[in-house]
Amino acid sequence: MKAVRIYEYGSPKVLKYETDVPDPQMGANEVLIAVAAASINPVDWKIRSGEAKERFPVTFPGILGRDVSGLVRAVGSNVRGVQVGERVMAFNRTGTYAELVAMPADEITHIPDGVDIIDAAAIPLIALTGDQLVREACELKKGQSVLVTGAMGSVGRAAIHSAMKLGAHVIAGVRKHSLAEAKLLGANAVVALDDEDALKELGKVDAIADTIGASTTKLLSNIKDGGICGTVVMPMPDGALHPEIRVIRQQAHPDPSKVREFADDYRDGKFALPIVRRFALSEAAAAHEFAEKGGAGGKVLLLML
């Protein structure tokens, strides 16, 4: 099969497009997916560069990628409820920069009618990361207040969406230059995180859902006693000077029903997720370079052309 592999840690140049990679072996409880698209997430370039090798070590040669959309090519002997040819999407732990992906059948979900099979690849990881950040790490409840940092990012958007559905009071935290655009995110309020006067007026919140990392440390004093700062970024905000709160790191785990919920909302116009550029799989190095520089404010996809 065609795939992109890395043989060492380094810059985007270590991403090697190959056409003779062995096909994955499918187990009895797995499905084989003919991949339509994968998407690039920050964890991908952190793994590629070696920044995340303590948490996510690579056995070389390795295939990166955690989002996948495509058609079911084959099903294992124990699999029920999935048919060859159906459109599916999923968060997989690795290996989606490839033509074929074998993964547990109970971790996939069907792509809703009305959602493009390519666009579907943008959804799984950011949806699960944002949702689990507010629900599990922040333990957010209806009526509580939460500040979402990095609100213009894909995970920030997902966190806002889930928090609003929970019935929380949601404040989108962005930079000054993004204030006008951030008002379209659907949060109850918007605050400029680089405006000291605005932060003083913010007052106390029950939780911070953090998607930017260590720089959130300065915001911890805005959390009520007994509150939580949930984060999905390393290095984490430093809570050493704030023993009255908890700082909790969240790592995404599979939840296909939640992926489907986000896909339904995306189809229905209830959840907006900008997709800014699509690259061929053979252009993975250029795609990483583009995404790592900021990706122009949205998701970057790899297409199996």
Image (cartoon, rainbow, N blue to C red):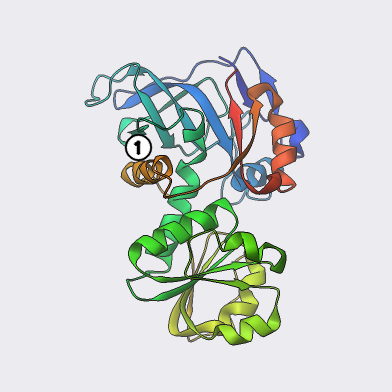
Q: Is residue 53 left or right of residue 208?
A: right
Q: Nearer the viewer, residue 66 or 243?
A: 66
Q: Residue sitting at 73 percent across and 31 percent down?
A: 285
The picture quadrant where one finds residue 4 is top right
Residue 112 at least partly seen: yes
Q: Quadrant of the N terminus?
A: top right
Residue pointed to by mark 1: 107
Relative image position of residue 62 (x, y in whole percent): 60, 31
Q: Residue 231: x and y, percent? A: 53, 64
Q: Is residue 163 above or below residue 98?
A: below
Percent x, y for residue 253?
A: 41, 48
Asked if residue 291 lies left or right of residue 227, the reply is right
User: Which residue is drawn at the image coordinates 51% and 28% (left, top)?
Assistant: 118
- Would you place residue 80 above or below residue 271 in this image? above
| Percent coordinates x, y for residue 295 in the rendering | 69, 44
Nearest the eye: 29 or 256 = 256
Q: Nearer the viewer, residue 123 or 179?
A: 179
Q: Quadrant of the C terminus?
A: top right
Question: Callout 1 environment at 10 Å: few (<14), some (14 to 19), or many (20+)?
Answer: some
What is the secondary structure assignment of the residue under circle 1?
helix
Report the residue that reaches farthest toward the top: 20
With 218 as the anchor, is 232 left or right in this view? left
Q: How many marks?
A: 1
